[in-house]
Image (tube, rainbow, N blue to C red):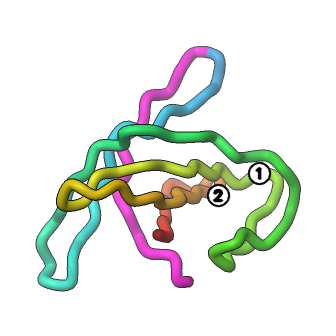
């Protein structure tokens, strides 16, 4: 599966943890779609490996498994970021 660019709004806490709150994705018509993250799980820092969606990650990659609602249906996506790179990618 290909990674796609995504804008992510996160809360950064004093202890260094990050909570993803919303994403903004450009659809095939060039329009931006915004989705609130309903649930998330931080699955970062678990070693270098290839994720089930085919994305190669290192121990430094930030990885969040998130649930969003798309047309009333729950959808699971994965958000990826490789610090210090500011770009976020998603699959799902």
Task: Tell me where residue 20 sits by quadrant.
Answer: top left
Tell me residue 11's x, y (percent): 43, 29
Membership of 2 in magenta stretch: yes
Q: Badge 2 is on which residue?
A: 82
Quarter of the image with the N terminus is bottom right
x then y, percent, for residue 26 = 23, 71
Lateral position of residue 46 relative to residue 57, left or right? right
Please state which of residues 11 and 73 is positioned toward the viewer in this rendering. Answer: 73
**Rendered residue at 46%/58% (across/down):** 76
> Is residue 23 inside the magenta stretch?
no
Instruction: Provide the secondary structure element on which disc 1 rests.
Output: loop
Locate residue 37, reporting x and y percent: 36, 43
Task: Name the N-terminal-most of marks 1 and 2.
Answer: 1
Q: Main secondary structure of the magenta part?
A: strand
Does residue 20 sit above or below 48 in this rendering?
above
Decide: few, some or many residues near mark 2? Use Cα within 10 Å; few <14, some 14-19, many ≥20. some
Residue position marked by numbered label 1 in the rendering: 60
Q: Is residue 69 left or right of residue 57?
A: left
Q: Residue at x 21, y 76 (%)?
A: 27
Q: Secondary structure at mark 2?
A: loop
Q: Percent x, y for residue 84?
A: 63, 51
Asked if labels 2 and 1 touch by Cβ distance under 8 angstroms, the answer is yes
Q: Which residues are magenta?
A: 1-14
Number of the label disc, if any, that sits on residue 11: none
């Amino acid at each position: 599966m290909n990674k796609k660019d995504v804008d992510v709004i996160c809360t950064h806490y004093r202890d260094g943890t990050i909570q993803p709150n919303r994403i903004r994705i450009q659809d095939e018509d060039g329009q931006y779609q915004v989705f609130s993250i309903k649930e998330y799980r931080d699955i970062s820092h678990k070693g270098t490996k290839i994720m089930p969606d085919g994305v190669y990650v290192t121990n430094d990659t930030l990885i969040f498994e998130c649930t969003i609602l798309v047309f009333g249906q729950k959808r699971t996506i994965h958000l990826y970021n490789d610090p210090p790179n500011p770009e976020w990618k998603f699959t799902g």
